[in-house]
């Protein structure tokens, strides 16, 4: 099971082809929009909600790493993508839960607030699709 | 933001995006037509951002400025960069991804309207 994510030889399918092309595109869109947003927030009003803005910046970096990991081929890129997508899944679940339990501590929404409700729940679905895709392409071709 | 302009941008990007996805489903890849659609959607996105910049200079600011800037920047960068990435794969998935890169403009425009206030 776990070996499918961490296969070390070159016999796996490329993660950037087929549906992967679409997945990398969506990761890129999230990296870009979250990154641009966090940059402006940190530059103009960092004192208002530093935790939320740093969290947005962190999410942007994770999306970027996942996009690069999925776009490139080879075992290192596959490992990188798997780690990034797992962090993304934990992040959206943890921040989603916390933002529901203690809304006062999240005055400024991040991509992961409310399980990504501001983004059509795509941030919640994306890591699941990402993990499925990594698992699916981790099979050795028959 | 000017609502009518936003609806025009949403309309163009939905029609072009779904059209390209339709071509992908049919497994067709007429690059000249796809490029024309991409150009139309990109031109619409650029006009909208330029109008928003003019409005901002005149003192009309979005309520959530940072979010707006993030979406505006993304809306003009995604169709060209996304489509080049998508179309570099010559399969229907590549074509479909190009269509999605145009639909992203519609989604971002809706969000820009929301955060403008």
Image: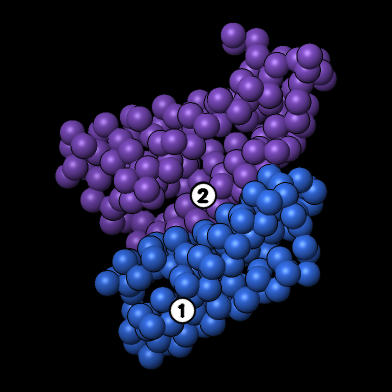
Chain colours: A purple, B blue
Question: Which residue sits at x=55%, y=26%?
Answer: A131
* Crowdedness near tag 2: few (<14), some (14–19) or many (≥20) residues, C-alpha within 10 Å: many
In the displayed structure, B56 sits above or below A78; it is: below
Of residue B86 and residue A61, the one placed in the foreground of this image is B86
> From where the camera sits, is residue B85 visible?
no
Label 2 marks a residue whose chain is: A
Of residue B4 and residue B77, the one placed in the foreground of this image is B4
Label 1 marks a residue whose chain is: B
Of residue B16 and residue A66, the one placed in the foreground of this image is B16
Q: Label 1: state its secondary structure.
A: helix
Question: Which residue sits at x=25%, y=38%?
Answer: A99
Question: Residue A64, position in %: x, y?
Answer: 59, 43
Image check: A97 left or right of B85? Answer: left
Question: Residue B41, position in %: x, y?
Answer: 59, 72
In the displayed structure, A82 sits above or below B91; it is: above
Question: Which of the two discs, 2 and 1, sits closer to the camera?
Answer: 1
The residues tagged by marks 2 and 1 sit, at their Cα atoms, a distance apart of 24 Å
Question: Which residue sits at x=43%, y=82%?
Answer: B5
- Reading the image, the residue beneath label 1 is B8
Quarter of the figure with residue A66: top right
- Reading the image, the residue beneath label 2 is A30
């Amino acid at each position: 099971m776990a070996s499918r994510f961490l296969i070390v030889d070159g016999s796996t399918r490329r993660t950037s082809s087929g549906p992967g092309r679409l997945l990398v595109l969506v990761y890129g869109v999230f990296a870009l929009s979250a990154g641009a947003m966090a940059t402006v927030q940190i530059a103009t009003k960092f004192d208002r909600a530093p935790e939320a803005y740093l969290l947005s910046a962190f999410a942007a970096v994770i999306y970027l790493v996942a996009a690069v990991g999925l776009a490139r081929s080879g075992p290192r890129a596959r490992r990188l993508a798997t780690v990034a997508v797992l962090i993304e899944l934990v992040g959206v679940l943890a921040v989603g839960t916390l933002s529901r339990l203690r809304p006062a501590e999240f005055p400024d929404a991040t991509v992961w607030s409310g399980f990504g409700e501001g983004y059509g729940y795509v941030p919640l679905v994306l890591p699941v699709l990402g993990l499925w895709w990594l698992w699916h392409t981790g099979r050795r071709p028959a | 933001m000017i609502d009518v302009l936003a609806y025009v941008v949403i309309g163009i990007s939905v029609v072009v995006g779904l059209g390209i996805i339709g071509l992908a489903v049919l497994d067709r890849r007429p690059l000249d037509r796809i490029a024309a659609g991409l150009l139309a959607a990109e031109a619409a996105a650029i006009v909208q951002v330029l109008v928003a910049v003019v409005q901002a200079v005149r003192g009309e600011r979005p309520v959530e400025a940072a979010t707006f800037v993030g979406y505006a920047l993304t809306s003009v960068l995604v169709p060209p960069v996304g489509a080049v990435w998508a179309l570099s794969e010559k399969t229907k998935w590549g074509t479909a991804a190009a269509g999605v890169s145009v639909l992203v403009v519609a989604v971002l425009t809706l969000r820009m309207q929301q955060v403008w206030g």
